[in-house]
Structures are given as C-alpha cells and as structure tokens.
Image (cartoon, coloured by chain):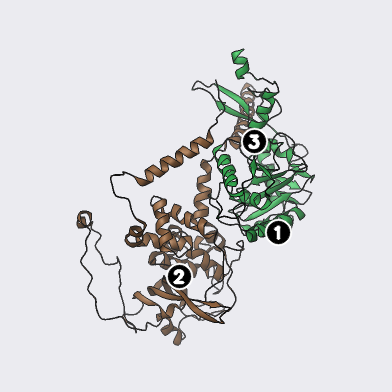
Chain colours: A brown, B green
Amino acid sequence: MYVAVKGGERAIDNAHDWLAEERRGDPSVPELGVAQIREQLALAVNRVMAEGSLYDPDLAALAIKQARGDLIEAIFLIRAYRTTLPRIGHSRPVDTGAMACIRRISATFKDAPGGQVLGPTFDYTHRLLDFKLAADGETPEAKTGAGLAPEMPRITEFLNREGLIQDESTCDDTPPDMTRAPMEYPAGRALRLQALTRGDEGFVLGMAYSTQRGYGRNHPFVGELRIGTVAVEMDIPELGFAIEIGEITLTECETVNQFMGSKTEPPQFTRGYGLVFGQTERKAISMALVDRALRWEELGEDSDGAPAQDEEFVLSHADNIQATGFLEHIKLPHYVDFQSELELIRKIRTEAQAGARKDAAE
Amino acid sequence: MSDYNFAYLDEQTKRMIRRALLKAVAVPGYQVPFASREMPMPYGWGTGGVQVTAACLTPDDTLKVIDQGADDTTNAVSIRKFFEKTAHVATTEKTRAASVIQTRHRIPEEPLTADQILVYQVPIPEPLRFLEPRETETRRMHALEEYGLMHVKLYEDIARHGHIATAYAYPVKVEGRYVMDPSPIPKFDNPKLESAALQLFGAGREQRIYAIPPHTRVVSLDFEDHPFEASKADHACDLCSARHTYLDEVITDDAGGRMFVCSDTDYCAGRQATGHHGRLSPQEATA
C-alpha cells in the first residue's frame, strides 16, 4: 500500500540536527575556536573573504567553522550575510603603491628599488610532511631583520617611463557594482575585474593556465607581486574630508606580457592586473593572466577564439556560488519533468518499434 | 527573526524588484534584467521565485508553496518555512485559500482566479539558450523577433522522431510577440498559462524577471500538421480516479509494480475528501 510521502518538515529538522552533530565531530576532541581558525587557517580565511566579497576575518573564520571546512559553503554563508548589509557608500581608491608590503617580488628584474622581499611564502619550502607539527606544533620564532625599505615603487612604472609598456588610461567614472546591477555584456574592464576578483579560485586558475598552454597565448611574466596592508579612506560628506576607516591586506599582481603590436598599438609590453583581498597570490596571478587575455579587443589583437578570451564565457561561469547552486540543484526532485520525458520516450519507442516490425514484415 | 526586514529583503531591494515586475507586466514575455540578490538559499533552489514572492507579499497574504505539485516536498517546506519566519504570513496548502502561490515545475490543477498571483521559479529563462549560448545574441534575436532557429529545431525534432521532442519547458509565444520559456512545467500545463491570475517568473541566478498578465494570449509553438498536444500518462489517478490531471508514476515494489497518482497533492486530497476513490484508495482497501 502506497502512503503519500509526508514528513518533509520533520526530515529537514532531523537532518539539521544530524549535521550539527557531525560538524562538532568527536566531543572528546576539543572544539575549534573561531580565533584559532582565523590565526592558523589564515589562507582559508583569506579565500573566503576574497570570494565572499567581504573583508572580515572573524566572520570568515566563523563561516569556515560552520561550513565544516567546505570553503565554497563558507563563501556562500558570507555572501548571504553580505547582501543583508546596507551599502553606506564607497571608499576612495586604495593606493597600493603605498602598501606596507610583507612580500614583494619581481620576476622581470634581478633587483629594483625597494628590493626583493620573499616574505612568508611556501615557494621554496620542500613539500615534506612535518611530523613535528603533529606532535607539538611549536615553531621557532622567526628572526627579525633590518626593516624593509620605506618605499617600494611600482616596477612596471620603470618600463612605463621608457614608454615600453602600454600606458593605463585613468578614468574618474564611478565603477559599476555587480552586486547592485544585473550583469550586461560587453562588461567593460572595471566590471570584469570585479567579477574575477570574487570568481572561483579554481576556475580562474584553470582559465589562466589554459592561456599559458596555448589557448589565447600571451606570454606573461610576473612584473610585480606585492602583498601587504593598505589604508582604506572614505570621504565623509558631513566632515568634508576623507578619514581612514581601517586597514586591509591585499595581494596585487601586475603581469608584463609580450606584444608585437597591432593595427592600433605599437610593439610594446602590455599588462594584466590582479587585485584580491588577503594573501591570495595564486588567485591574484591567475586573475592578471585572465584579465590580459580578455583585453584582446581593446589592444586591437585578433582573438584566437580561446575560452579565456571570451568575456561572456569567463564572467558568466566564474562565480562558484552560482555554479555550485545550479549544479547541485539537479538533486532536488525533478520527477514531474522526468515523468513527461518518460511518456515521450515510451511513445517514440513504441512507434519506432512498430515501424521496424512493419519494415521487417514487408 | 526581528533582525530582518519583512519578507527578508530590504525595502530598497523590494522596490527595485517591483519596478522590474511592473516592466515585465507591461511587456508580457519579455525578460527584464534585475539586480538579483544573493539569498540565504542556494541558486537553483528558487532564489528568483523567492525574491519575487518577497516583493509581492503583504502581511495580509496567504502563501502556498509547491514543488512538483506537492506542498510537502522538502524544498517547498523549506521555502514556506522561510516566509513563515521572515514575513509571519499565513500559509496554506489549499490552492483556493492562497493569495500568492510559489511553484516549481507545476501549475495547480484548479483554475486560478483574478485575486491570485502565481510565482514561478525559473532555472534558465532564455528559451533560445540551448540553440544559442550567448546572451548578447539571444537578446538581439528577441529584439528582432528572429525565432526561425526555434522553428527549425522543432521541425528537426519531427523529422527525426516524428514528434516535437520537448516534454517540459515547452516554448510558448506570448501575446503574439515574445517567445518565452514557461519554466520546466510539463507541457500538459501549458494550456493553463492562459489564466485569470497574474503569473510572475523569477530567475535569480540569471537575473531575469518576466510575466504573463491575466488573460494574456499564450500559444504553445507548433505546426499546422503537428499541433501541440498537452500529454500526460494515459491512466487514472490510483487514489482519486481523476483522468484529467497530471500524474506521477510511483514505483511500489521491485517487481515492476507501479501506481499513478496526481502530482497536485492538494487537488487529489480534495477529490478524495469529496468521495472520489481510485484503484488503490485506502477506503477501497479496507472496504
């Protein structure tokens, strides 16, 4: 006897209780604190802030805890929270040239004013599991050296002075806000960069990698990669001047790309640009490569028709919250549609088989 | 949940959505871009429908939420709970008692009335999307009323299979102008798109809203020699014996046993309450 499936409500409540229990894990193991996540899983926190488009390490750490370490789920929590916040205004453009860097490297020059600063990087570590961390986790204190150079001028500016690199035109237009207006194509560079900086790290990485392997090739060098803190200033209308409202960590990457010239531009180097919240250098470099690939039209290049050169393709698939939602929604019930397909297939098959029998008889 | 505004969205956002809705009603079948917000449920779970419902609800409304025609499917339960919590509106499972109905994949069997709003959740609002993936192109095609590609597709279906091989999300032409995706309702429901109720469609991820105002002409695309046919399983409901409703096929054992039941659970329950019995009704089994 068939009993109509009831109890969706109870099932949901029970699933949530079970989830909460699983999230906590074995209660004899001490619970993770949000501060521990913020301090010791800082790169995960950075990714959640970058793709969640909200700079708040404590909330990002909380989201990671709540999401059981599923970073896309954590990003989703942050995004859903972000939309409930009023938009009170916008800051002045941050001056990354005045960044207090903890890392600053250039691959195009052996040395440059301000120096090469490795900073806290995995780059030259040997990827050997450190079993000592499993035992006690205590690390020796890092040595403090002489202070960093107070000024670190932008490396691409050295090329710019010689006119060897394409000049970036300045623009005082208020940039569009993709969280407040529907996406329209062609999007323009400001909107593209906005979409890329909150785009999925894996997707942007894959797109960037594809350009290196020949799909829209534009050979890049890391002209400069810098990570550090910048002041955020905001004009307060009541005061009539700007005040500093806080400090954020950013990763900025400028690539220098070969360019043989086009109908409209002389032979020169060109640029790709990446700027991401937190210490997120894989993402910033990827973003710069994809940005450069998408600039083919404004630079008068011919498109190879490569995926990374296709603005609508890249921008409409870069968001992991949209992607994961639509992908996973196929697990919701679809039995009404499936039933209609079932009827159609049965009908077409019956007719096809009847037709085949008729042919055989003749 | 007093920390959130009535029906979750802030008033500015609701105003933005209402503007898009007004435009959609003024240009039936036209997809109006709107600044869809990130909602606390995933894209694909009905974020577009939820935003449209939030923008339409007043404290006096009575809300019904269905998924696959049923009020008790998990996602319908979840969305209904969301509005109970954030808007404190009355909810119902009775089609007749509802002033706003949010649906996924079905139109209720009972004809809707002029004082009702039906809100659809839409995954892909663009009927031409699977023929042309680019939004820039499809917008141009709509602007120029260039629908040849769609007719070619339907014709090729007939040439290849003898039928138009679209069983749900069957394209329609609205008021003789825009070709529109009615959302993934089975084509059985297409004739109900001509209704006394206001029908609103929300696609959150794709940031589009569109509408069919009351009594608008909605024609399912077809050919003279292959007219549109609203098909369903050729059975009667095993619980209420209805022959005119859309049926779900339910597998009852591992030996090929199956039964057919109305997908509209409220309609089926209503018929059973008024004495209609089907082949497998509990009443008959005990009698």
| Whole-number angstrom distance, CA of label 1 to CA of label 2 | 35 Å
Q: Can residue B128 be seen in this view?
A: no
Q: Label 2: chain? A: A
Q: Hey, what amino acid is under mark 1?
A: Arg
Residue ranking furthest to the top: B287
Density class for disc 3 (Cα within 10 Å; few <14, some 14-19, many ≥20) is: some
**Vertical placement of B144 versus A163: above or below?**
above
Which of the image's four quarters has the C terminus of chain B?
A: top right
Locate residue A232, reporting x and y percent. 47, 75
Locate residue A41, reporting x and y percent. 34, 59
Q: Hey, what amino acid is under mark 2?
A: Leu
Q: Hey, what amino acid is under mark 3?
A: Glu
Q: Quadrant of residue B248?
A: top right
Locate residue B97, reporting x and y percent. 70, 37
Mark 1: secondary structure: helix
Which residue carries the number 2 mark?
A: A275
Q: Which mark identifies residue B19?
A: 1
| Whole-number angstrom distance, CA of label 3 to CA of label 1 | 29 Å
* Upstream in sequence: badge 3 or badge 1: 1
Which residue carries the number 3 mark?
A: B93
